[in-house]
């Protein structure tokens, strides 16, 4: 894993003390929260885990690359799989 793809442990801008989220290596729980906020519909950790069990890509450490996940969803939708 290259440094730019590794999760950051640095505080977020603004000094909130939270680590910055890396969309290329996001823990499943964080990915669910981000997708819920961005998409306007609830996305749960269980929903993401079901997609992972169905073949959605993950990084070697089990984290989710949101771009790869989105591409997988598009491919599944075009193939008729829900």
Image: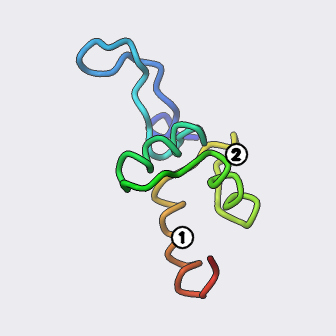
Q: Residue 60 carries which label?
A: 2
**Spot occupied by residue 45 in the image (x, y as percentages of width and height):** 62, 45
* Quadrant housing residue 55: bottom right
The vertical placement of 43 against 68, above or below, is above
Residue occupying image coordinates x 52% and y 37%: 30
**Is 12 in front, or is 38?**
38
Q: Residue 73 carries which label?
A: 1
17 to the left or right of 62: left
Residue occupying image coordinates x 54% and y 70%: 73
Numbered disc 2: secondary structure: loop
The vertical placement of 81 against 69, above or below, is below
Numbered disc 1: secondary structure: helix
58 to the left or right of 24: right
The vertical placement of 50 against 18, above or below, is below
**Spot occupied by residue 36 in the image (x, y as percentages of width and height):** 44, 48
**Spot occupied by residue 8 in the image (x, y as percentages of width and height):** 46, 26
């Amino acid at each position: 894993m290259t440094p730019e793809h590794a999760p950051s442990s640095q505080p977020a801008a603004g000094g909130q003390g939270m680590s910055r989220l890396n969309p290329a290596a996001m823990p499943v729980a964080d990915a669910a929260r981000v997708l819920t906020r961005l998409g306007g519909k609830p996305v749960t950790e269980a929903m993401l885990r079901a997609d992972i069990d169905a073949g959605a890509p993950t990084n070697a450490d089990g984290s989710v690359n949101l771009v790869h996940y989105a591409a997988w969803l598009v491919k599944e939708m075009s193939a008729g799989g829900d």
